[in-house]
Image (cartoon, helix red, strand yellow):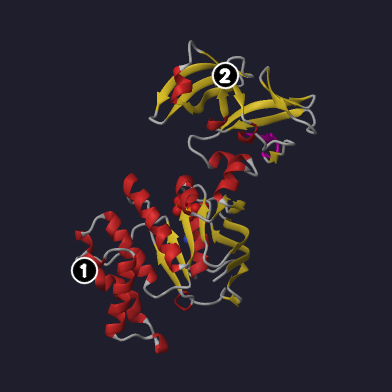
């Protein structure tokens, strides 16, 4: 089922009485989620992600705007009639109930025609338990399960009513690093198998990049960019998007355009045809540095971090007071002698941003290698 948010705004009264007024948690957000897709709602803490989710499932009403499921306007529809499955960060399982009873719980409140008999409820619970691979634990209590298994139970409970839409609010936050990886693969598998339109909220860009069909990047209640993960990474619309995606983070330098050329400090980095003279930010992805004698960006090596397959070169440049980071192959790092480093920059990994608006300024032919 397709989901459409049309100019959604959500204002809350400011809890800080001294400041008074209102907080705009979500600001004029419009979004279309195609049927059967997994969308990652991504942004820093407090940007409005959970509020968006709560409005989609009906726990909060928008101050302005409309929400559509397919062709139906559901803005006024109560949560229980929206057919939405929710999974939260803290699993919220009932400790005194078994796994089976926890999974069946949402089915017990069904009314009218939707009501199921006990055998049907059990069959439905068995079906989703098999899907999330927890069939062997049906008679255990939640405390007898690992965090990953508990989260699977929570997902099974979210799926048991065969929802039209599945909402996952930071579902992996309580899991350790390895389990996060495994569980996110699981979520992708389950989503592909069921084909349920899914919204996945996270503040972890790697998580969002790895499982989403498309990413909605938010900040301060507003959408900054929507696109496929690779598109947002390769073509960030502004400095915030460039900085938020990618680990290690993109390196941002004070730079300037002069005579259609881009300079970082005194170093001429590239041609910049069609861009008027001005101060700009030049941002370079860590994998965009090509270490070679006579390279254009002249830097000072501070440290080499060996990370197994690749190596991080920590370096400084006069146009940036903080350390910068380049990712190079182990072979390249072995050839480095002394503390002088020279880099050329891969054009597709270099972005220029306005110093005023922080929006990206396209470089003609900039994405060609
Ligand atoms: P996190 O990742 O930390 O959960 P988030 O992106 O989900 O953050 P929200 O929880 O949606 O952010 O909150 C967005 C903004 O709205 C925040 O400034 C928050 O303090 C505010 N807010 C959320 N709920 C309420 C409420 N019921 N009353 C007042 N302000 C609220």
Who is closer to the viewer here, 259 or 321? Answer: 259
User: Where are the magenta residues, as a range?
Assistant: 350-358
- Position of 294 relative to 68 (above/below): above
Q: Residue furthest bottom?
A: 112
Q: Is mark 1 within 8 Å of ligand 1?
A: no
**What is the crowding at mark 1: few (fewer than 14 residues within 10 Å), some, or many (at least 20)?**
few
Who is closer to the viewer here, 17 or 308? Answer: 308
- Position of 334 relative to 185 (above/below): above
Residue 60 in view (yes/no) = no
Q: Hey, which quadrant is residue 131 in on the image? A: bottom left
Q: Residue at 32% of width from left, 73% of height from top?
A: 127
Residue position marked by numbered label 2 in the rendering: 292
Q: Hey, which quadrant is residue 66 in on the image? A: bottom right
Secondary structure under tag 1 reads: loop
Is there a contact, CB below 8 Å, between mark 1 and mark 2? no
Location of residue 151 in the rendering, given as x and y in whole percent from the top left corner: 32, 59
Location of residue 60 in the rendering, given as x and y in whole percent from the top left corner: 50, 67
Who is closer to the viewer here, 195 or 176? Answer: 195
Q: Is residue 368 left or right of residue 173?
A: right
Q: Earlier in the sequence, mark 1 or mark 2?
A: 1
How far is the residue under mark 1 from the one under mark 2? 64 Å
Location of residue 4 in the rendering, given as x and y in whole percent from the top left corner: 60, 67
Instruction: Specify the quadrant that holds the N terminus.
Output: bottom right
Location of residue 78 in the rendering, given as x and y in whole percent from the top left corner: 49, 76
Residue position marked by numbered label 1 in the rendering: 96
Q: Residue furthest top?
A: 338
């Amino acid at each position: 089922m397709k989901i459409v948010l049309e100019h959604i705004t959500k204002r809350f009264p400011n809890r800080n009485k001294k400041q008074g007024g209102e907080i705009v948690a979500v600001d004029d957000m419009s979004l279309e989620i195609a049927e059967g897709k997994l969308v990652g709602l991504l942004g820093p803490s407090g940007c409005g992600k959970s509020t968006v989710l709560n409005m989609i499932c009906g726990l909060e009403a928008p101050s302005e705007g409309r929400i559509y499921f397919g062709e139906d306007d559901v803005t006024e529809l109560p949560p229980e009639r929206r057919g939405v499955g929710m999974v939260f960060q803290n699993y919220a399982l009932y400790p005194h109930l078994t796994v089976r009873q926890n999974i069946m719980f949402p089915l017990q409140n069904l009314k009218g025609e939707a009501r199921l008999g006990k055998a049907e409820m059990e069959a439905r619970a068995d079906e989703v338990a098999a899907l999330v691979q927890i069939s062997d634990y049906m008679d255990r209590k939640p405390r007898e399960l690992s965090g990953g298994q508990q989260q699977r139970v929570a997902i099974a409970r979210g799926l048991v009513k065969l929802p039209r839409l599945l909402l996952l609010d930071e579902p992996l936050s309580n899991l350790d690093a390895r389990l996060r990886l495994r569980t996110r693969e699981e979520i992708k598998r389950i989503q592909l198998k069921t084909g349920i339109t899914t919204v996945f909220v996270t503040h972890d860009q790697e998580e969002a990049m790895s499982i989403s069909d498309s990413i909605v990047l938010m900040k301060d209640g507003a959408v900054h960019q929507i696109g496929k993960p690779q598109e947002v990474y390769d073509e960030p619309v502004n400095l915030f998007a460039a900085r938020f995606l990618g680990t290690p983070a993109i390196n941002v330098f004070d730079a300037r355009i002069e005579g259609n050329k881009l300079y970082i400090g005194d170093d001429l980095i590239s041609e910049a045809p069609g861009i008027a003279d001005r101060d700009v930010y030049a941002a370079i992805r860590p994998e965009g540095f090509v270490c070679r004698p006579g390279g254009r960006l002249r830097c000072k090596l501070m440290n080499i971090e060996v990370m197994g397959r690749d190596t991080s070169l920590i370096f400084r440049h006069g146009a940036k007071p903080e350390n910068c980071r380049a990712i190079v192959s182990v072979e390249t790092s072995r050839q480095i002698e002394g503390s002088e480093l020279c880099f050329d920059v891969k054009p597709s990994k270099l972005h220029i941003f306005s110093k005023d608006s922080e929006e990206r300024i396209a470089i003609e032919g900039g994405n060609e290698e």
